[in-house]
Amino acid sequence: MKIRQAQTSATYLLPDPGELDQRIVIRRRVDVPADDFGVTPTYPEQIRTWAKKAQPGAAAYQGSVQIENRVTHYFTIRFRRGITADHEVLHDDIFYRVKRVRDLNGKRRFLLIECEALGTDNGSDYAAESIFTR
């Protein structure tokens, strides 16, 4: 397909069969008041599904950092309604905050979930021991 100057959005390649090979949990986070005047997270909805995990390129990551809306990972899943920024993704004991959800090519077949890595359940950062953060 020839890309024209008037085309305003990119056309994304749909995942090939077998590419949705990572098991993830998508859950809606609701903070409820705690006894110590803080909040306690609860998860009333959980969805277990297969996903394709990818990282953005250097230019896309740098652009997201500059506008203070950091995106560290993409998850592609089969289309589902109701996934919003109130949800978080759990994959390999690492939590990801959902930043944006996009319908891939507007076909209602796949969703592209843009996320920011938050760290593990015990509060440690997943990249704390990386040579790039020392």
Image (cartoon, rainbow, N blue to C red):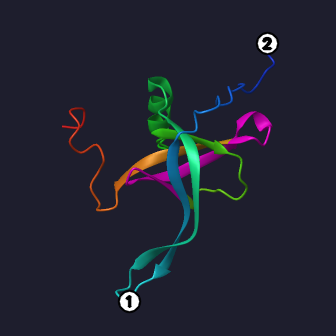
Quick one: label 1, few (<14), some, or many (20+) residues within 10 Å? few
Mark 2 residue type: Met
Residue at the limit of the structure toward the left, as seen here: 134
Residue drawn at x 56%, y 43% is: 51
Query: Distance from label 2 to label 1 (Cα)?
Result: 59 Å
Q: Position of residue 116 (x, y in %)?
A: 46, 46
Are circles 2 and 1 on residues that touch, CB within 8 Å?
A: no
**Vertical placement of residue 86 versus 18, above or below:** below
Mark 1 residue type: Asp
Badge 2 marks a residue whose secondary structure is: loop
Extent of the magenta region: 88-110
Which of discs 2 and 1 lies nearer the camera? The answer is 2
Q: Where is residue 37 in the image (x, y as percent from the top left)?
A: 38, 85
Q: Which part of the image, by quadrant, shows the N terminus?
A: top right
**Vertical placement of residue 62 versus 113, above or below:** above
Residue at the limit of the structure toward the top, as seen here: 2
Between 28 and 53, the one nearer to me in the picture: 53
Residue 1 in the figure: left or right of residue 17: right
State yes or no: residue 101 in magenta: yes
Between 129 and 51, the one nearer to me in the picture: 51
Q: Position of residue 59 (x, y in %)?
A: 48, 24
Residue drawn at x 46%, y 42% is: 70
Residue at the limit of the structure toward the bottom, as seen here: 35
In the rendering, which numbered label is found on residue 1? 2
In the rendering, which numbered label is found on residue 111? none
Residue 106 in the figure: left or right of residue 71: right
Q: Where is residue 5 in the image (x, y as percent from the top left)?
A: 78, 14
In terms of secondary structure, what is the magenta stretch mainly?
Answer: strand
State yes or no: residue 23 in magenta: no
In the rendering, which numbered label is found on residue 35? 1
